[in-house]
């Protein structure tokens, strides 16, 4: 066993896949000798050569488009967005070209578009985004969003092996903040499309993912100690396709659902989850489906502003307490 | 009456030799393109074509000649056609019946009724259909060329872009990436004078599309797009160069779109005298035939035989598929992902 960070787990996952499969290659901005803005690909250029770790111009649409073309021909591109905020520059390419390719034309496009997302790091409006909701209604795309070190490794490996295109979101607040013992010499693969119970509970379910999973776990701990409320916490891990069975199972168990995400509220994923619970577990509900999210504003820079806008542990505790008492 | 500049702006090596059989094969594809489109017009008027119909009248020469310069066959060169490159698709091996089925949205069409007209592909034969977002195929074809480079395969990609399409961001991003990476990619810029109803002067402030390519360090030539020989020679040069690892090459073909954007468009915005002049004096098929006959390269009877053969082929293909069924409604569901199948996720199954 060795203790590794979230970032190191990602690095190991991509490295192992490149060692295992010579069809896997990396392309993106500053990914080569520099090793990427966050150093996820540090040392890759030296080990695998410049032809498999390609520095590109600042052209997100071309990065995603070229990855698609290479994927059609049987390669396995891993495209990095330096910050996932810039995926909007490739929105057309990813949603219109890549995601539709199998359905409209029978084209295989096994590729990963990955990059650092999320706030709590004083990154301001354009280095903090969570773009998942913009891609959730894109049939043909998978969206993966790990919260733990183990899943960072297991899911990036599974995404690289997946036959369909995957948008892989890495919360940069987690990159060096969380550590976990991972076994050496044992392959870690986390199946795409399966949520995980992060904490067992009886009275109320919190459904979350990414950085707010950790804040939800903190809130659950506080509620257990202060109120004696037993909170179950579900880590979605994959957002598309969504694990309906896990969501329905936890709601049927605790009869109350609180959805927590860092993305803004209107049109956020919480709305979709609430609709699914309504369709599939309405009769089991003992209270309204609640959500804790960011406020509907672009994410501001100043610590006072950012902390106010993003969901904090206290916000989750308050909402859960209210729902538990309902 | 002067036609637009048609002289090459950079040297194209002459001396490309085409055998009489090859010359006749090129004629076959020119004639097949035109006859098949005329058949599609008839089917459109009978409301058998489900969506719009897009003609390549006047552009068959550059389509066929450029595709003909590629190596064809299983796992050889790959091209990505636009809506007015039916001729290119046929050269690469797409069958008339596939085109007819696509336009009529038949269940047995290459996309099973999911996509339109020439939006389909067969990467083994060497063609990748476009999507409607112009410019997007430049980065995608750069990626295909990148796969050739990474694997050390002596293969070339060829992609078309219209004069209007060169205004998109993806065109510029893709061309620049391909140039920096020295990818084996040939880009054909089709200056056909009309992007839907927009003329070149409202689309860009340069005279020739080749100037745009030169801005990225890409060698570029401008050729007479209605001269089959000129387009073939220029493309052959660019393809050979790309195959030798010398990188991207841009060929601008000056041509003219002689029909509206699609069949519904009466092109009232196009000056009539221009249309008449291009039809009368600069039709690519007429010019090609004239060259063949005045140069005594082929016999007139051979051309006549091809005309007859094409007519029979198009008749047979039409008869074989015109009454085929459309896809069943529920066939709309599967195939979004490899796994899980969409059918397992039917929202209405919970009711």
Image (cartoon, helix red, strand yellow):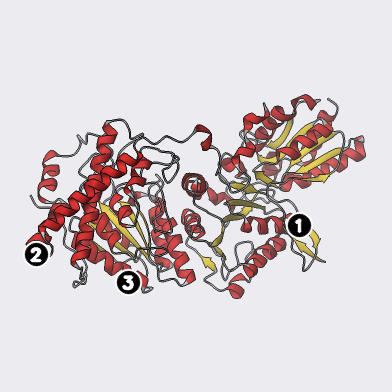
* Chain holding disc 3: B
Residue A271 lies, in percent from the top left, at 66, 32
Q: Establish whether labels 3 and 1 are both on one chain.
A: no
* Chain holding disc 2: B
Residue A134 lies, in percent from the top left, at 57, 41
The residue under label 2 is B296
Q: Find residue B26 and report its image quarter.
A: bottom left
The residue under label 1 is A150
Label 2, label 3: how far apart the Cα atoms are: 31 Å
Are the residues tagged 1 and 2 within 8 Å (C-beta)? no
Residue A106 lies, in percent from the top left, at 49, 49
Q: Which mark is residue B4?
A: none
Q: Earlier in the sequence, mark 2 or mark 3?
A: 3
Q: Find residue A184 and report its image quarter.
A: bottom right
Label 3, label 1: how far apart the Cα atoms are: 48 Å
In which quadrant will I find the C terminus of chain B? top right
Are the residues tagged 2 and 3 within 8 Å (C-beta)? no
Q: Quick check: can you spot residue A92?
A: yes
Q: Is residue A84 depicted above or below A258 in this figure?
A: below
Q: Which residue appears at 55% of the width and 38% of the height?
A: B333
Residue B20 lies, in percent from the top left, at 18, 66
Using the image as rendered, state which of residue B45 and residue A18 is in the foreground: B45
Q: Residues within 10 Å of mark 3 (few under 14, many from 20)?
A: some
The residue under label 3 is B241
């Amino acid at each position: 066993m060795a203790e590794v960070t979230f970032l190191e787990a990602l690095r190991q996952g991509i490295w192992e896949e490149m060692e295992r499969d010579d069809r896997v290659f990396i392309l993106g901005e500053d990914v080569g000798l520099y090793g990427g803005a966050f150093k996820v690909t540090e040392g890759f250029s030296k080990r695998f050569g410049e032809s498999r770790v390609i520095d590109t111009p600042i052209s997100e649409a071309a990065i995603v488009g070229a990855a698609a073309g290479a994927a059609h021909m049987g390669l396995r591109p891993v495209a990095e967005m330096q910050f996932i905020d810039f995926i909007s520059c490739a929105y057309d390419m990813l949603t219109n070209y890549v995601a539709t390719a199998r359905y409209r034309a029978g084209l295989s496009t096994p590729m990963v578009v990955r990059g650092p997302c999320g706030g709590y790091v004083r990154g301001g409006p354009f280095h903090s985004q969570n773009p998942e909701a913009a891609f959730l209604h894109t049939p043909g795309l998978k969206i993966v969003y790990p919260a733990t070190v183990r899943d960072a490794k297991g899911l990036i490996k599974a995404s690289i092996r997946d036959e369909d295109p995957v948008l892989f979101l890495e919360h940069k607040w987690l990159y060096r903040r969380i550590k976990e013992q991972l076994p050496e010499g044992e392959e870690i693969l986390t199946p795409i499309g399966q949520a995980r119970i992060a904490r067992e509970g009886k009275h109320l379910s919190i459904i979350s993912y990414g950085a707010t999973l950790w804040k939800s776990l903190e809130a659950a701990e506080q509620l257990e100690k202060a109120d004696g409320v037993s909170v179950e916490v579900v880590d979605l891990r994959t957002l598309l396709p969504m694990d309906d069975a896990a969501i329905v199972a936890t709601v049927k168990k605790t009869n109350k659902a609180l959805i927590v995400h860092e993305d803004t509220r209107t049109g956020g994923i919480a709305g979709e989850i609430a609709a699914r619970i309504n369709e599939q577990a309405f009769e089991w509900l003992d209270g309204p489906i609640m959500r804790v999210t960011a406020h509907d504003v672009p994410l501001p820079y100043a610590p006072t502003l950012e902390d106010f806008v993003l969901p904090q542990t206290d916000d989750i505790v308050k909402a859960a307490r209210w729902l538990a008492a309902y | 009456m002067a036609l637009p500049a048609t002289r090459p702006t950079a040297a194209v090596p002459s001396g490309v030799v085409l055998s009489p059989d090859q010359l006749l094969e090129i004629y076959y594809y020119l004639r097949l393109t035109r006859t098949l489109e005329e058949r599609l017009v008839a089917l459109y008027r009978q409301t058998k074509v489900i969506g719009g119909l897009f003609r390549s009248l006047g552009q068959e020469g550059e389509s066929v000649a450029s595709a003909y310069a590629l190596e064809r066959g299983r796992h050889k060169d790959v091209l990505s056609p636009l809506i007015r490159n039916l001729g290119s698709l046929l050269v690469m091996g797409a069958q008339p019946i596939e085109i007819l089925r696509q336009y009529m949205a038949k269940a047995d069409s290459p996309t099973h009724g999911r996509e339109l007209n020439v939006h389909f592909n067969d990467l083994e034969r060497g063609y990748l259909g476009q999507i409607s977002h112009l410019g997007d195929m430049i980065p995608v074809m750069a990626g295909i060329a990148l796969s050739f480079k990474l694997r050390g395969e002596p293969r070339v990609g060829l992609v078309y872009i219209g004069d209007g399409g060169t205004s998109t961001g993806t065109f510029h991003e893709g061309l620049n990436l391909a140039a920096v990476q020295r990818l084996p990619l040939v880009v054909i810029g089709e200056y056909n004078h009309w992007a839907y109803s927009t003329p070149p002067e409202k689309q860009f402030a340069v005279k020739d599309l080749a100037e745009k390519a030169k801005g990225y360090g890409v060698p570029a030539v401008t050729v007479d797009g209605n001269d089959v020989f000129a387009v073939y020679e220029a493309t052959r040069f660019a393809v050979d160069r790309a195959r030798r690892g010398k990188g991207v090459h841009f060929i601008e073909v000056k041509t003219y779109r002689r029909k509206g954007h699609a069949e519904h468009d009466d092109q009232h915005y196009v000056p009539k005298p221009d249309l008449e002049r291009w039809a009368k004096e600069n039709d690519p098929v007429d010019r090609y035939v004239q060259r063949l006959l005045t140069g005594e390269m082929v016999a007139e009877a051979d051309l006549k035989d091809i005309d007859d053969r094409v007519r029979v082929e198009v008749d047979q293909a039409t008869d074989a598929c015109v009454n085929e069924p459309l896809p069943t409604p529920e066939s709309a569901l599967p195939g979004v992902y490899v796994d899980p199948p969409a059918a397992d996720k039917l929202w209405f199954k919970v009711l």
